[in-house]
Amino acid sequence: MICQICDFKGEGKSFSNHLKSAHKISSKDYTKKYLRSDYKGCLKCGVETRYVAFDFKKYCKNCAGIAMSNGGKKGGKAESWNKGKTKETDFRVKGMSGESNSFWGKKHKEETKNRISMTKQLGSVEVLERIMKRSKDFEILTPINEYFSRQRQYLDFKCKKCSFVCKKTLQAFERGSLCPKCYPISKSKSEIEVFEYVKSLGFNDAVSGDRNIIKPKEIDISLKQSNFGIEFNGLYWHSDVVDSAKKEDLLNKTILCKDEGIKLMHIFSDEWEFKSDICKSMIKNRLGICSKIWARKCKIVDLDKKEFDRFMNKNHISGSVNSSIRLGLVYDEEIVTAIGFRKPRQKKWKDYYEISRFASLQNHVVVGGLSKLIKTFLSRFNVKIMTYADRRFGEGLGYEKAGFKLIGNTGIDYWYSDGIQRFDRFIVKADKELSEREKAAMMSLYKVWGCGSNIWILE
């Protein structure tokens, strides 16, 4: 199905989610406006009928009898052929049960069975056409002339990536069944995309579902030679709806990996869905393959709010945020890194300025950029600085190189989610009548836990 608003292509739930997140419209309202603009309700009485799969029923429940009597394409399911009668009360079948039935004890001959089977069997040309649609992924080894059933026969397919031979029905093959060796069971499509992206960067040592580093726990994607790992977190499966113990899951894995010398990066499914370019840049940065720009070759500029917001929304995983002081480094007439400062929300930091955002241009590292910006800020304002480093992406060791001191962490943080994306926890606030949990339930939102942040200060 193609979205008539923006040309997005999708089916079923993914299409509904797209309408909700991208255009803030329900699938029902979209159907009324774009697919069924001629819809006027029940054909009999005009009452709105039941909405099902981007369409509406022709008749309401009170007029369903009309649909039954019309039957088939004219209205709906045809009326029951026996009109509620049983074998005992219907003269058409009365006395025909058991041995009195003329078909009692009879069955099709093998010749008849074969003839029936042949009428349902796909021709060799059509089988080949269906297989060729996935010729980039698999090669069929079973001779076409041996094919006899789409659902009951297992055919041999050879994976073109790893040469593993697997057995699949033609039906499963058509529906997109993957190679079990390349894509172990229980991996989501998005997680597989992240894995494929890492391998496309030339890191062929990447392992999917590695259980050898922090046994018995699994690292979704590990690169042991690079001391790096990626955990892909679906919003639903890492929420308190599934298990309250999930609260500590992300942080525990981060600490276990740290003990083994592995720097673990967490990616939420909504980040990969809506900000995959930034996620890819962050992966490249941690693997040390981003382009380098030297801060000494850049000039310092003050950024207005629009410039700062535009840069952060394009390059920072959390987007922009209000900042009272905004600085940037420019190289070849382009902003390559930016930093924002503000007064902290918490009173205990009233004598400090907080680094609200810091980011570099996608796929680039500005060597010495943070230090140069910090020095410029301190030359203008004789103040102390503090900041938070989200442990989902690292410990914030870049601040240590800039002279900051680690003094602790915030503990585990959380967001609220509707299953499609996350929202700041402050979207749900308790009042005199309802608790935060009750309000979240009323809004159909649930908690998704993070790793918390390290706290760094510069005095």
Image: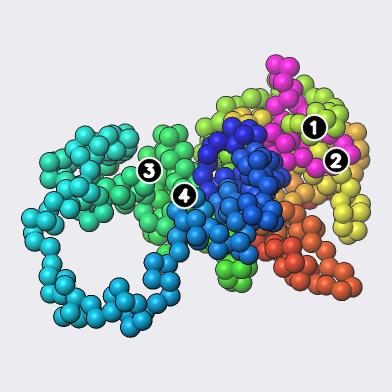
User: Looking at this view, is 374 or 304 the one in front?
Assistant: 304
Q: Position of residue 62 (x, y in %)?
A: 63, 64
Q: Nearer the viewer, mark 4 or mark 2?
A: 4
Q: Which residues are magenta?
A: 312-339
Whether residue 115 is situated above or below residue 326 in the rendered picture: below
Instruction: Please tell me which of labels 1 and 2 falls first in the chain.
Output: 1
Distance (Cα) linking label 4 and label 2: 62 Å
Distance (Cα) linking label 1 and label 2: 9 Å
Determine crowd level at label 4: few under 14, some 14-19, many 20+ residues with C-alpha closer than 10 A. Answer: few
Distance (Cα) linking label 2 and label 3: 42 Å
Q: Nearer the viewer, mark 1 or mark 4?
A: 4
Q: Nearer the viewer, mark 3 or mark 4?
A: 4
- Residue beneath label 1, please? 308
Picture residue at 13% right of the left edge, 67% below the top: 107
- Residue beneath label 4, please? 73
- Residue beneath label 3, please? 205
Badges 1 and 2: C-beta atoms under 8 Å apart? yes
Q: Outermost residue, top direction?
A: 332
Residue type marked 1: Phe
Distance (Cα) linking label 1 and label 4: 59 Å
- Residue beneath label 2, please? 323
Instruction: Please tell me which of labels 3 and 4 falls first in the chain.
Output: 4
Number of callouts in the render?
Answer: 4
Picture residue at 80% right of the left edge, 42% below the top: 321
Element assignment for label 2: loop
Whether residue 415 is situated above or below residue 20 in the rendered picture: below
